[in-house]
Image (cartoon, rainbow, N blue to C red):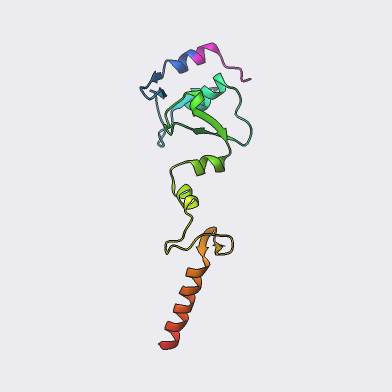
Amino acid sequence: MVDIAEKDVARFWAKVAIEPTSCLAWTAGRNSYGYGKFYWAGRNIPAHRFAYLALVGEIPAGLSLDHLCRVRHCVRPDHLEAVTPRENTLRGVNHVADQVKRTRCPQGHAYTAASTRIKNGKRECRTCHNRARRDKRAASKSA
């Protein structure tokens, strides 16, 4: 368990308000991404991490905290779950999660192990890729 002074805990909770959504909202400073920040142990740390440390305990090595409520300034520990960074990203609302959730290419072909290739870290439909290569070859022959 982390050793946190009682005065730090009192100072922390003075900056929290209960929202109608049942979140515990951080009312003090936030970073540019909307996460609360709290000065503790000589540095700024994310406010939700302090709440988790104070009420739940250490965050396991290699894991990060995911806001299950999707409210970045929420510090309620039961709205936080320790997950891998990959899981946290895939649960989020971002372009990476959007791409992973897609099961078909823009032309409607299914992304399967056999019909998909990875190029430069991105999925590519083999059917569309092969069609584009054939079209390019045909265009160069007719020119």
Q: Is residue 72 above or below residue 105?
A: above
Q: Which residues are magenta?
A: 1-9
Task: Name the spot of residue 132 as percent of width and height, x first.
Answer: 46, 73
Q: Residue at x 47, y 74 (%)?
A: 131
- Residue lying at the far bottom of the rendered structure: 142
Looking at the image, which is closer to me, 28 or 135? Answer: 135
The answer to whether 126 appears left or right of 36 in the picture is: right
Image-quadrant location for residue 73: top left
- Name the quarter where the N terminus is drawn: top right
Q: Residue at x 51, y 63 (%)?
A: 124
Task: Name the spot of residue 141 as percent of width and height, x first.
Answer: 45, 87
Task: Name the spot of residue 98 as percent of width and height, x first.
Answer: 45, 49
Labels in figure, total: 0
Image-quadrant location for residue 14: top left
Looking at the image, which is closer to me, 106 or 88? Answer: 106
Looking at the image, which is closer to me, 130 or 1? Answer: 130
- Residue lying at the far left of the rendered structure: 20
Magenta stretch holds residue 7: yes
- Name the quarter where the C terminus is drawn: bottom left
Q: Residue at x 45, y 83 (%)?
A: 138
Q: Residue at x 44, y 46 (%)?
A: 94
Task: Name the spot of residue 9 as percent of width and height, x first.
Answer: 51, 15
Q: Is residue 114 above or below residue 73?
A: below
Magenta stretch holds residue 62: no
Looking at the image, which is closer to me, 39 or 34? Answer: 34
